[in-house]
Image (tube, rainbow, N blue to C red):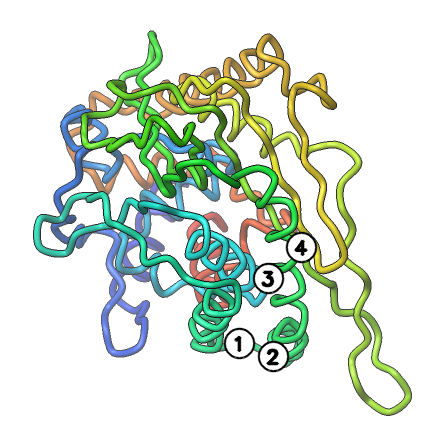
Amino acid sequence: SYLQVSNLLSHTLNNFFIGSKSYSMLNNKKKLDDPLNELALPNFARLGINHHSPTSLSYPDGVFIYRYLICDQETRRQFEGNANMAAGVAVNNALQYYYAHKIWKHNPLTKKLALVENKKFTNEEAIDKAMEEYRKYNPVDELDQEKFDHYLETIPQTIRQGFIIFNELCGNRHIVCEAAANHKPKGLDLGISGRIDFKVFSEQDLVEEQSPPGDFITPLSVLELKCSFQKGMKRRKDGSRSFSNAKLPSIPHINHLKQISFYHSAARPVVSKLVYLTADGFKVFDKNNCTDLEPVNLNNYYNQLIRTAKRRERLLRRYDHINDTDRIKKELILDTSGGFDHPFYWKIGNRFVQHAKELWSQ
């Protein structure tokens, strides 16, 4: 009943602690200034929502509600990660350190994105820097520790596979990394925003990209990087963990297609490419070898993304008549499923999963 959920929320908000800090979904701390804030409408802003992203639009409603409405940004930073994610970041960073001429980074003083000249690293310097950052990751359990240790060997191998294919994709080109992609399709109250791994320009352009989103030179291509790592298998007789070989996909994952369809629409490159890496090889999908990446089909995937965003906005607007933000969140919990059977999206840490299950239990 509504009363049961209300009482449960009150109880968990008073008694749920993270470290030494009290967890409160009502305590929405002031957020950093963001260029997207101007897109926010009052009814969405009070819930902490000022834009969509390809990632959030891939989440089931229950996962989205918990991550972005129940939890604030500070709390999300305390979600448990995993060695796979940390390894993927390391590979992406190493390739950006080597190939990027400029990288968009968050300026802590202005609290906005700024274009920064990238120090040109050698291959080995890029690997060493990425591995130094990877070693700062703290595994969350025994299996994650074993994966973390195993990836210390396979991350450099994966990066070197990246050097092979990215020499072909980025050689003699002007590369800009982590560029913001912002687009507000017709029929949406909020825009969609994301960050592009690699934007590839012709050398003669030497684009500065200091202008606002939407006012830029058309890139030759946008590259979205995806990495696959070995899965932990059964223990050997000597007690050590065995690992499977990471496999390259035969076709792109649908969520990856939706993601790059957004970048294709926002950046309008000549061609968009999905690049998959493992320690043993690579595969590149584009319009020449994958019909899903032909412009007409990318547009279809983009329309799917927009339909999800429209449905999500209708869900949130259902409670426009309610002035109490806390009550809106209670109603959203009552009207949606937690979706706790999903194998990946709820890997945020047992204490957070338990808290979410308590909220959706009544």
Contact flag, marks 2 and 1 (Cβ < 8 Å): yes
* Residue at mark 1 to residue at mark 4: CA–CA distance: 25 Å
In the image, what residue occupies the spot 46% across and 67% down? 130
- Identify the mark nearer the N-term, 3 or 4: 3
SS label for mark 4:
helix
- Identify the mark nearer the N-term, 4 or 2: 2
> As displayed, is residue 229 above or below residue 194?
below
Mark 4 or 2: in front is: 4
Contact flag, marks 1 and 4 (Cβ < 8 Å): no
* Residue at mark 3 to residue at mark 4: CA–CA distance: 17 Å
In the image, what residue occupies the spot 19% across and 32% down? 210
- Identify the mark nearer the N-term, 2 or 3: 3
From this viewpoint, which residue is outermost toward the right? 237
* Residue at mark 3 to residue at mark 1: CA–CA distance: 10 Å
Residue under circle 1?
Answer: 139
- List x then y, in percent, for residue 267: 39, 22
Which is more toward the observer, 52 or 300?
300
Q: Which mark is residue 145?
A: 2
Quarter of the image where the N terminus is located: top left
* Residue at mark 2 to residue at mark 3: CA–CA distance: 11 Å
Q: Which mark is residue 84?
A: 3
| Disc 1 residue crowd, few under 14, some 14–19, many 20+, Cα 10 Å | some
Left or right for 136, reference 166: left
* Residue at mark 2 to residue at mark 1: CA–CA distance: 5 Å
Amino acid type, residue under disc 2 in the picture: Gln
Left or right for 178, reference 26: right
